């Protein structure tokens, strides 16, 4: 259910620490993976060597994107960050969605291997200690304003198959921030008959009851339960949401509520039922989605979703950027 937009060949470590995830249509995806990766630097680490290596890197602002120049190979043994320039925009507040533009450079040969600056989409993360589990990255962003720049280093790593990814360096810009709602805000909507019944506890966490539901739909159902008054969601937006997902028979398979943190992801990088169902909704809305297999995970099994399953989600749209 949850996967990152990055690939291991691009920036195997930096991907996980940025913590961006999405509901992927890839049938191989683990449906129980947390949107906030659990990779984090040890509490007590001597980063002096890595920080010294960052001092050997020259940041140059370009017309479209910054470049990093250094004498390769350049390796680090720990994560580290080096501030380049402060920003003069909005301050980053705890709980904001922070949009990070970046380029990734290989420590092996000094080549650029990825960039969001030239026509790409900034990486959106929810800025909190619970969501940003890498303390190095958290400290690099904490107290900064929009426009701040820094270099982030990640050490080499070896995959289970023996493939080694060299140390990598990211030129990062705090592109923008978006305030996240605490919960849905708007007018309640009376749902159509024949749909599962949604109940919220005192914290806003949803549960679902299929007892009075009619026949299982064979087409996408999009039922607003609360109609928000915020901006209209576009397919190109990155959303921050709380959500829970069930198989039509009532079995829960995923929930950001249970993980205790919201999820942020590009709406263009999720299963088709989410893209079609949430585009056109408004920030502040709570939406019930019933997604048939052809707009979900198809006929292939995932780790916790049998092939051919019709899925039901309750989604709180808390921010769009």
Image: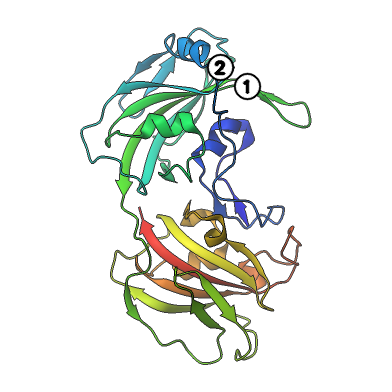
Occupied quadrant, residue 144: top left
Q: Are marks 2 and 1 in contact (CB under 8 Å)?
A: yes
Residue 209 visible to an observer of this rendering: yes
Q: Which residue is mark 1?
A: 156
Q: Which mark is residue 117?
A: none
Residues packed near mark 1 inside 10 Å, few (<14), some (14 to 19) or many (20 plus)? many
- Which part of the image, by quadrant, shows the N terminus? bottom right
Q: In the picture shown, does residue 36 fall above or below 180?
A: above
Is 170 on the left-hand or right-hand side of 185? right
Residue 118 visible to an observer of this rendering: no
In this view of the protein, which residue sits in the foreground, 134 or 25?
A: 134
List x then y, in percent, for residue 229. Answer: 28, 70
Residue at the left extreme of this rendering: 88
Who's the residue at 53% across and 53% down the image?
A: 269
Q: How is the image coloured?
A: rainbow
Who's the residue at 31% across and 45% down the image?
A: 177
């Amino acid at each position: 259910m949850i996967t990152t937009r990055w690939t291991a060949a691009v920036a195997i470590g930096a991907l996980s620490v940025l913590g961006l995830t999405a509901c992927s249509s890839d049938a191989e995806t683990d449906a129980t993976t947390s949107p906030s990766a659990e990779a984090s630097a040890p509490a007590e680490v001597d980063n002096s060597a890595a920080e010294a290596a960052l001092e050997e890197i020259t940041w140059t602002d370009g017309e479209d994107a910054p470049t990093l120049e250094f004498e390769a190979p350049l390796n680090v043994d720990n994560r580290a960050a080096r501030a380049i320039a402060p920003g003069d925009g909005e301050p980053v507040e705890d709980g904001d969605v922070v949009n990070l533009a970046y380029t990734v450079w290989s420590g092996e040969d000094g080549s650029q291997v990825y960039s969001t600056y030239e026509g790409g989409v900034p990486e959106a993360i929810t800025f909190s200690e619970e969501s940003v589990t890498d303390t190095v990255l958290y400290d690099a962003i904490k107290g900064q304003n929009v426009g701040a720049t820094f270099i982030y280093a990640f050490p080499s790593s070896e995959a289970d198959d023996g493939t080694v990814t060299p140390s990598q360096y990211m030129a990062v810009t705090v592109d923008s921030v978006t305030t996240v709602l605490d919960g849905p805000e708007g007018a309640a909507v009376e749902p159509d008959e024949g749909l599962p019944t949604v109940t919220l506890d005192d914290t806003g966490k949803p549960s679902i009851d299929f007892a009075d539901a009619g026949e299982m739909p064979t087409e996408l159902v999009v039922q607003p339960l609360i109609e928000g008054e915020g901006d209209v969601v576009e397919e190109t937006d990155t959303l921050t949401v709380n959500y829970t997902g069930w198989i039509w028979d009532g079995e829960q398979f995923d929930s950001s509520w249970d993980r205790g943190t919201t999820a942020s992801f590009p709406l263009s990088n999720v299963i088709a039922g989410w893209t079609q169902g949430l585009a056109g909704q408004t920030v502040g809305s709570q939406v019930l989605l019933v997604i048939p297999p052809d707009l979900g995970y198809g006929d292939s099994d995932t780790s916790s979703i049998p092939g051919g399953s019709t899925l039901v989600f309750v989604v709180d749209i808390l921010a769009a950027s």
